[in-house]
Each structure stands twice: as structure tokens, then as C-alpha cells.
Amino acid sequence: MAAAFAVTIALAGCYRNPGSVLQNMSNARQIAARLQVEFAQASDATNLAVMADTDTASRQFARETEQKTLAIHRDVDELRHILGDLMFASEESLLDDFERKLAAYRRLDRTILDLAVASTNLKAQRLSFGCAQQAADDFRIALEGITQTTPEDSCQVQALCFRALAALRQIQAIQAPHIASPSDDVMTQLEQTMSAAEADARSALQSLGPVTPPDTKTRIAAADAALTRFVQCNQQIIALSRRNSNVRSLALVLGQKRKLAAECEDSLRALNESLAKRGFSATR
């Protein structure tokens, strides 16, 4: 007991804030440990924002990231003040190193969160399952109406309707790989295939007019209108898919973010270990 008191008195004579040396050291260790937890939580929230399957969830996790980041900055400021009072130059240097690495990490993190919240690939997917699917169904129904009102032996009509529907189905089948592709070149090739399929569907519809009874004209017009809606929706899908925000944010999380996060974690670990050694040597 007397030895510990003597150590405290000795330390008090060396530091600018002699009345609370041991308390400051305890606070410093607690804040440094809390920084590790807060950084891990902020990093996890960013990952969840990227992996979220709804816009609402992605925005919520992005807000959590920002809240945890604010807490990190508050704790860094508080810890810096305490380390200054204690005159722990080596630990201040370690904290400076963490702040430098955190700044680089945060620049990337903000980019990731902006991409994740945009959710362009998810929006494209919803359009594919939504307006595009509805237009495709309307197109199919209109074509079925044409085949049902023409003689059963009209092979040409049957073939043209099948050709038109097959062309549209080809576009639908290509939407998913387009949305998932990280490559602009691959997307360009897929779009060229889509354009060729659209032209084939329209050609088949135009060829139906001369070989079908007059009472099928309204159904051909309905099919044409449905195809136009489908193409317009597909153009929106392509535009959103081209932005590739979900694919890009995931690639950043799996690549650059892992490296920068590991560097920040290493700095915090070194800071905690250094403070732990100080505490041991000062209190044993």
C-alpha cells in the first residue's frame, strides 16, 4: 500500500495534472479499448449497408456508421487531451498514426456508403421483377389472343408469335447477368444482344399484320404497346445497372476496405498494448 502511494506521488511530480494521474491512465485505457469496439461496429455497419436488401435498411446501417464514426472522433479528442496531460508522447504518436489511417479509411468508407445507399443494382432488379415482368406478361397475353383467333392450321401466325415472345424472353433472361456484371464490356455485349432481340420481336409483330384476320389488329396493337412498355422499362434497368453501385460497393468492401480497416485496427491494437504496459509498470 505504501509502495503504491509512493509510486503515485512520484508520478504526480512528473505530470502536468498531478492530482489524477492514475485516474487519467485508467480513463485512457478505457477510451482506447472503447475505440477498438466503436471502430469494429462502424466497420460492420458499413458492411451491412452494402449487403442490405432494401433501401431503408441500407440507409439505416449507413446512419449507424456515421453515428459510430462521430463517437470515434469524440473519443479520439478526449484521449488526446488525457495523453497530453500524462505526457505520454509515444502513445500520442500512436494515436496520430491511427487518425491518419482513419482519415484514409473514412474517405473510402464514405464512397462505399454513397454507393450502397444508391442501391442501383437492387433497383434494377426490382424493375426487372416488376414493370418489366408485367409488360412481358401483357405481351404474352396479347400474343395468345392472336393465336386463339386465327385458324389452328395457320403455322405462320403461330411461328411469328412464338418468335416475338422468344425474343422478349431472351431480353428478360439477359437482364439478370447484366445487373450482376461488374464489367462494362460485358454489359455492352449484353445490350447489343438485347437490341437485336428487340428488333426481332418488332419485326415479328409487323409481319403478323398481313397474315392475320382484321379482328386481330387490336391484339397486335396491344402486343406492340406492351413491347414498348417493356423496352422502356428495360432501358431504365440498363441505366441503373450501368451505375453498378451495389456491385462496386461490394468490391470495395472485399478489397480496399479490408486493407484500410486492418491498418486502423493494428494502430488501435498497438495503442492499447502500449497503454497496458504503462499501467502495469506504474502500478506494480
Image: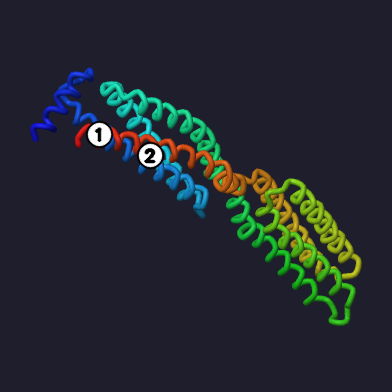
- Residue at 82% from the left image edge and 61% from the top image edge: 201
Relative vertical location of residue 266 with respect to residue 134 in this rendering, above or below: above
Which residue is most to the front?
3
Pick the front one: 64 or 191 = 64
Q: Which residue is mark 2?
A: 68
| Mark sitting on residue 281 | 1
* Extreme-left residue of the structure: 2
- Callout 1: helix, strand or loop? helix
Nearest-to-viewer mark from 1 and 2:
1
Q: Residue at x 68, y 66 (%)?
A: 137
Seen from the viewer's position, the closer of residues 146 and 29 is 29
Is 5 placed left or right of 187 in the picture?
left
Spot occupied by residue 130 in the image (x, y as percentages of width and height) = 61, 59
- Mark 2 residue crowding within 10 angstroms, few (<14) / some (14–19) / many (20+): many
Number of dots carrying numbers: 2
Q: State the image quarter where residue 22 is shown.
A: top left
- The quarter of the rendered structure image containing the C terminus is top left
- Residue 55's x, y, as percent? 50, 49
Q: Residues within 10 Å of mark 1 (few under 14, many from 20)?
A: few
> Tags 1 and 2 in contact by the CB under 8 Å rule?
no
Q: Is residue 249 left or right of residue 61?
A: right
Residue 171: x, y in percent?
75, 59
Question: Position of 193 compared to 71: left or right?
Answer: right
Q: Quadrant of residue 156?
A: bottom right
Q: Amino acid at mark 1?
A: Ser
Q: Earlier in the sequence, mark 1 or mark 2?
A: 2
Q: Is residue 279 above or below residue 151?
A: above
Residue 240: x percent and y percent? 65, 46
Residue situated in front as seen by the camera: 37 or 84? 84
Amino acid bearing label 2? Lys
The answer for how far apart the CA atoms under marks 1 and 2 are is 32 Å
